[in-house]
Image (tube, grey):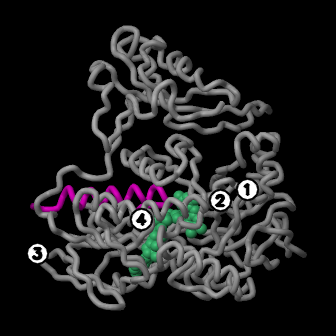
């Protein structure tokens, strides 16, 4: 089945577009309403036109009662049941349905709601506000960080009419890419321009996965923005949507141009090194940010620092920003030939030509005193990269291009640690993580080569005599990862690998390699904030957002968190 995302109707028709107001059809057919029909199971080669019939059957209404239909989400079910694998798409569709006895007022439809096959259409929300509070007119807010959290906070503010300055310690994309290429060529790291810092933030060199597990009202608006900047339209409904580094690099300059059009001023290669604040009525207020070239006044600050700006967090903590410890993940990357994963997931490698490179998301539960572990951030047809910003510390992650065309599949394989394991101090998790990052850096030879071990050797606790080809461009060195990792990480990973072998044959075979360390799948620090106002505790005009503040774990969740906090800023700003 080839899915276009809209069936029999123009994609705009009948679909509420939060940026453009109520669509025509909703005014004409007052009694029709929008619903989401869940869980239509569709064969791979089934014609798209059948979805309408499937939706009518599942919701118990007449075909004619469906005024419009579009795909809301599509995922692939590749599970083996009773020893048999039958690949099917599971599709949720958004439909506009007439009222009346043949439509949404019918008994059968009401029954479908009770059975959970149909739900009300999830609400959507525009990024910006049409009407700006008087007190915000002429104001100027600082956004620190141009990752997804910072960019979408800036967009929401600027489009609503708020003046915005975006600061990033790293450079604009083209310059950043030259530094990254230089690092890969010469092994000389620029601490301010790398895979973590610079335009677009940490996800700029990534697989660009942009799905979340939650249907947030802001998600459609963010996806629309990305599509208008050149992302493929299927990101709006593909449950495994990814953009890829190559396309992200075309999208980001267009997004930057939109932000500039909306009135945003960018300050590249400008690191925030502190702030000046005043205290009034028990609440502190930032009045200016300190940069290395002087002070910049502001009415408030959105802090979108990402999880690796520890120098900044340390300074701001000394200046009164509250911080607390949070659970975080630690582990390694596991890499396989993509063909092995394709066979394991699809049963037949050739299906990958039709469906694209296979992905997985696997987990193993805790038990017998051993913690749970899971795979994360899987990059089909991707490569392992050194996502580092500090000399002497090694950390790996994964990225892919839009075609998923490398012969390797890699993913994080991690377990969760927290204050109970590493201590309650805000920086305890970071210190624990850095100690491991340093030992992996040194075990790799101190030139960004990464320690690696064959999976069977890791499981049996013995050295690997050699490491075959991997996707990690800076080279791998055979090392005892089983000894470099403390037992509280090693044992959950061991158990998980054995468990995953049952789900994907070959997962724990000689063809699988561990490369490490993967220590920044999530931040270890949270900035406590007010649930509704979203301001940092004790501060009236500081909005900590995104992954660095502990409220996001990926591109989309960071973008949503940034935009949502910008909305709180505008909503609750006193007149
Ligand atoms: C290699 C890699 C691959 C990834 N792949 C995916 C993926 O496929 N899908 C996914 O959902 N997530 C992925 N992630 C995670 C994702 O990138 C992050 O969750 C997301 O970028 C967090 O967004 P953010 O805006 O909170 O912070 P970041 O994106 O980290 O942005 C923070 C920005 O703040 C700037 N900054 C920091 N300190 C200062 C300062 N003092 N002054 C000025 N600027 C400062 C930094 O330069 C940076 O640009 C990946 C991460 C990496 C490293």
Secondary structure under the numbered disc 1 in the rendered image: loop
Magenta residues, start to end: 550-575
Say which residue appears at 29% left-offset and 90% top-offset. Answer: 294
Residue matched to label 3:
281
Q: Which mark is residue 401?
A: 2
User: Residue 395 is drawn in which quadrant?
Assistant: bottom right
User: Residue 465 is drawn in which quadrant?
Assistant: bottom right
CB under 8 Å between callouts 4 and 2? no
CB under 8 Å between callouts 1 and 2? yes
Q: Earlier in the sequence, mark 4 or mark 2?
A: 4
Residue matched to label 1:
405
Q: Label 4: few (<14), some or many (≥20) within 10 Å?
A: many
Q: Comparing marks 1 and 3, which lies closer to the viewer?
A: 1
Along the line of sight, the residue nearer the viewer: 60 or 438: 60
Q: Label 2: few (<14), some or many (≥20) within 10 Å?
A: many
Residue matched to label 4:
256
- Magenta segment main secondary structure: helix
Q: Position of residue 430 (x, y in %)?
A: 51, 78
Q: Position of residue 281 (x, y in %)?
A: 10, 75
Decide if residue 313 is in sight here: no
The answer to whether 404 appears left or right of 10 in the picture is right
CB at disc 2 and ligand 1 closer than 8 Å:
no
Q: Earlier in the sequence, mark 1 or mark 3?
A: 3
Q: Position of residue 545 (x, y in %)?
A: 37, 65
Secondary structure under the numbered disc 4 in the rendered image: helix
Q: CA distance from mark 1 to mark 3?
A: 58 Å
Q: Earlier in the sequence, mark 3 or mark 4?
A: 4
Q: How many marks?
A: 4
Q: Comparing marks 1 and 4, which lies closer to the viewer?
A: 4
Query: Does the magenta segment cover residue 561?
Result: yes
Secondary structure under the numbered disc 3 in the rendered image: loop
């Amino acid at each position: 089945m080839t899915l276009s995302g809209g069936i029999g109707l123009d994609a705009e028709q009948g679909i509420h577009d939060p940026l453009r107001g109520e669509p025509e059809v909703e005014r004409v057919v007052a009694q029709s309403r929008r619903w989401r029909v869940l869980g239509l199971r569709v064969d791979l080669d089934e014609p798209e036109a059948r979805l309408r019939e499937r939706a009518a059957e599942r919701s118990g209404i007449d075909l004619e009662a469906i005024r419009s239909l579009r795909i809301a989400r599509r995922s692939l079910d590749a599970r083996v049941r009773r020893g048999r694998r039958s690949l099917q798409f599971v599709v949720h569709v958004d439909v506009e349905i007439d009222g009346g006895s043949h439509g949404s007022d019918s008994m059968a439809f009401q029954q479908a709601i009770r059975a959970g096959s149909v739900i009300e259409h999830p609400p959507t929300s525009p990024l910006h506000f049409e009407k700006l509070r008087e007190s915000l007119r002429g104001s100027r807010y600082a956004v620190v960080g141009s990752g997804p959290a910072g960019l979408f906070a800036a967009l929401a503010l600027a489009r609503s009419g708020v003046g915005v300055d975006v600061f990033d310690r790293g450079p604009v994309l083209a310059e950043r890419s030259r530094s990254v290429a230089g690092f890969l060529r010469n092994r000389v790291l620029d601490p301010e321009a790398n895979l973590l810092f610079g335009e677009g933030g940490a996800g700029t060199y990534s697989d660009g996965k942009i799905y979340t597990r939650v249907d947030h009202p802001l998600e459609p608006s963010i996806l629309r923005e990305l599509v208008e900047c050149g992302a493929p339209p299927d990101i709006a409904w593909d449950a495994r949507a990814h953009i890829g580094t190559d396309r992200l690099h075309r999208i980001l300059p267009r997004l930057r141009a939109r932000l500039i059009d909306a009135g945003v001023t960018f300050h590249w290669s400008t690191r925030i090194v502190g702030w000046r604040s005043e205290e009034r009525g028990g609440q502190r207020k930032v009045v200016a940010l300190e940069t290395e070239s002087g002070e910049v006044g502001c009415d408030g600050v959105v802090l979108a620092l990402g999880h690796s700006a520890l120098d900044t967090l340390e300074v701001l903590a000394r200046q009164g920003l509250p911080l607390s410890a949070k659970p975080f993940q630690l582990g390694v990357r596991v890499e396989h030939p993509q063909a092995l994963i394709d066979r394991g997931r699809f049963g037949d490698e050739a299906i990958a030509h039709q469906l694209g490179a296979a992905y997985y998301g696997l987990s193993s539960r805790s038990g017998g005193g051993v913690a749970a572990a899971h795979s994360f951030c899987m990059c089909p047809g991707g490569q392992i990269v050194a996502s580092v910003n500090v000399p002497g510390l090694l950390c790996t992650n994964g990225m892919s291009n839009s075609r998923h065309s490398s012969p390797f599949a890699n993913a994080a394989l991690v377990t969760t640690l927290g204050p109970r394991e590493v201590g309650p101090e805000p920086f305890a998790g970071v210190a624990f993580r850095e100690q491991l990052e340093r030992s992996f850096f040194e075990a790799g030879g101190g030139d960004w080569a990464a320690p690696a071990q064959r999976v069977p050797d890791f499981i049996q606790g013995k050295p690997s005599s050699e490491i075959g080809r991997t996707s990690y461009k800076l080279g791998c060195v055979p090392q005892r990862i089983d000894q470099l990792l403390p037992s509280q990480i090693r044992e959950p990973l061991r158990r998980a690998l054995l468990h995953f072998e049952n789900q994907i044959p070959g997962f724990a075979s000689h063809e699988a390699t561990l490369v490490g360390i993967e220590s920044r799948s999530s931040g270890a620090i949270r900035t406590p904030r007010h649930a509704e106002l979203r301001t940092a505790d004790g501060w009236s005009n500081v909005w900590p957002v995104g992954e660095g503040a502990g409220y996001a774990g990926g591109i989309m969740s960071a973008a949503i968190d940034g935009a949502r906090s910008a909305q709180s800023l505008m909503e609750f700003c006193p007149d």
